[in-house]
Amino acid sequence: MNGKSKLVLGMMSGTSADGIDVALVRISGAPPNLNARLLGHASVKYPPALRKEILRVAEQRPLIAGALSQLNFRLGELFAGAAIAACRQFRVALSKIALVGSHGQTIFHQGRPMPYFGSPTASTLQIGEPSVIAARTGITTVGDFRPADMALRGQGAPLVPYADYLLYRHAKLGRISLNLGGIANITVLPRAAKPQQVLAFDTGPANMLIDALVAHFTQGRRRFDKNARLAMQGRSLPALLDDLLGDPYLKLVPPKSTGREYYGRAYLKMLFSLGRHYRASPNDLIRAATIFTALSVVDALNRFVLPTTKIQQLIVSGGGAHNPLILAQLAAALPGIEVLPSGRLGIPEDAKEALAFALLAYETLHQRPANLPSATGARGLAILGKISYAPPR
């Protein structure tokens, strides 16, 4: 590829498995002067029955290999369809797109090595076959970004900090980028940060617990708590919240990452048990999970960031950025730090992660590393992803 700007599609489906976010990005240059301009973003929801199957698989329910293989290819078709539909919405011909970067759908992530047949093993699995995307769209596609970092003993997550560094580093301001997807994760960017100074990790749950509670208590009629309406109707139960804030994950020293493997079905059962113990109503529990999301972020900042790093701004993206109770709790607990949605800096809250994977794919095709070992714990730099070339024309 030459030095001219390229149109790249980034695609992402997070741990909430709501659907596929697509970002159209014009990218040019090379680090440290890599330029990315968001031209459009779109979201495509998963069919309800397929989403249910994705969540079932991600909860580590029994599964035969054939079903996993089928799901991988079916999701590849859906990701390809999302790319085609987005280009139609953006009024851009597929032939104008130079590259697709698809994160795929995470169904398992074990960042820290665990014993497996006598050897400590870490692993990850994202599905949504990139070869299918390349074949259906006619666009070379980069996918499977995480294993290269893990092969160097990194956690394979978080990977978005590379994009955060390019987008948000500031000569005079210390900033934190907070993404509130299924899981909450932060990227810490000290004033005038160099790449090796960037700290990033998952702080705990975000929408994953809230959405699961809402779906349970509404028998699936609602998938999330729009504008925190249910949480606002609940009572605050300080003792229940204190129990949640005793979560051992919060005390783990970064680098660290987590997901549905920890904050999934078993954690939800524990939350229901706490609710019964404290005689919590459904809305009380939803409120507790919402406030826990905010305060677990605050706990991480107070524990691992603010004692050593001066921060002026907290930039919030992801679905949780639309939750007024989370934002209010963050602002109240972090006096002196401006809490602002990423949209105020020109990147819509729901587009940031898809944009990030467009950037990562662009770097892969240029054979440049895009992990940050200070964030993932990897032993060195890695060129991320695997390339599925478009069929010959």
Image (spheres, rainbow, N blue to C red):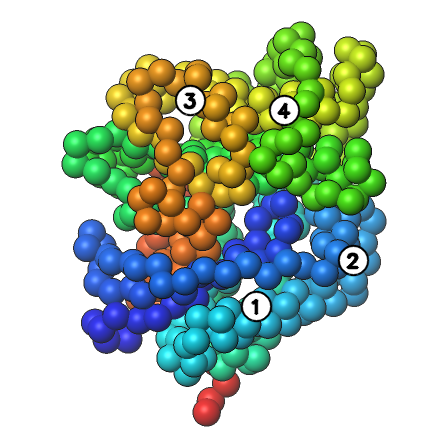
Q: Residue at x 54, y 34 (%)?
A: 323
- State the separation of the CA atoms marked 2 and 3: 38 Å
- State the separation of the CA atoms marked 2 and 1: 17 Å
Q: Of helix, strand and loop, which one carries label 3?
A: helix
- State the separation of the CA atoms marked 2 and 4: 30 Å
Q: Of helix, strand and loop, which one carries label 2?
A: helix
- State the separation of the CA atoms marked 3 and 1: 36 Å
Q: Earlier in the sequence, mark 3 or mark 1?
A: 1
Given residues 241 and 384, the one toward you in this image is 241
Q: Residue at x 28, y 48 (%)?
A: 166
Q: Quadrant of the N terminus?
A: bottom left
Amino acid of disc 1:
Ala
Residue ranking furthest to the bottom: 393
Amino acid of disc 2:
Ala
Q: Which residue is mark 1?
A: 82
Q: Is there any visible trace of residue 124 in the rendered image?
A: no
- State the separation of the CA atoms marked 4 and 3: 17 Å
Q: Earlier in the sequence, mark 4 or mark 1?
A: 1
**Residue 111, relative to residue 242: is it above or below?**
below
Q: Which residue is mark 2?
A: 49
Residue 234 locus on image (x, y percent): 69, 20
Q: Earlier in the sequence, mark 2 or mark 4?
A: 2
Q: Of helix, strand and loop, which one carries label 1?
A: helix
Q: Which residue is mark 4?
A: 232
Judge the density around disc 2: few (<14), some (14-19), many (≥20) Cα neighbours within 10 Å.
few
Q: Earlier in the sequence, mark 2 or mark 1?
A: 2
Discs 3/1, front? 3
Q: Is residue 147 left or right of residue 341?
A: right
Q: Which residue is mark 3?
A: 331
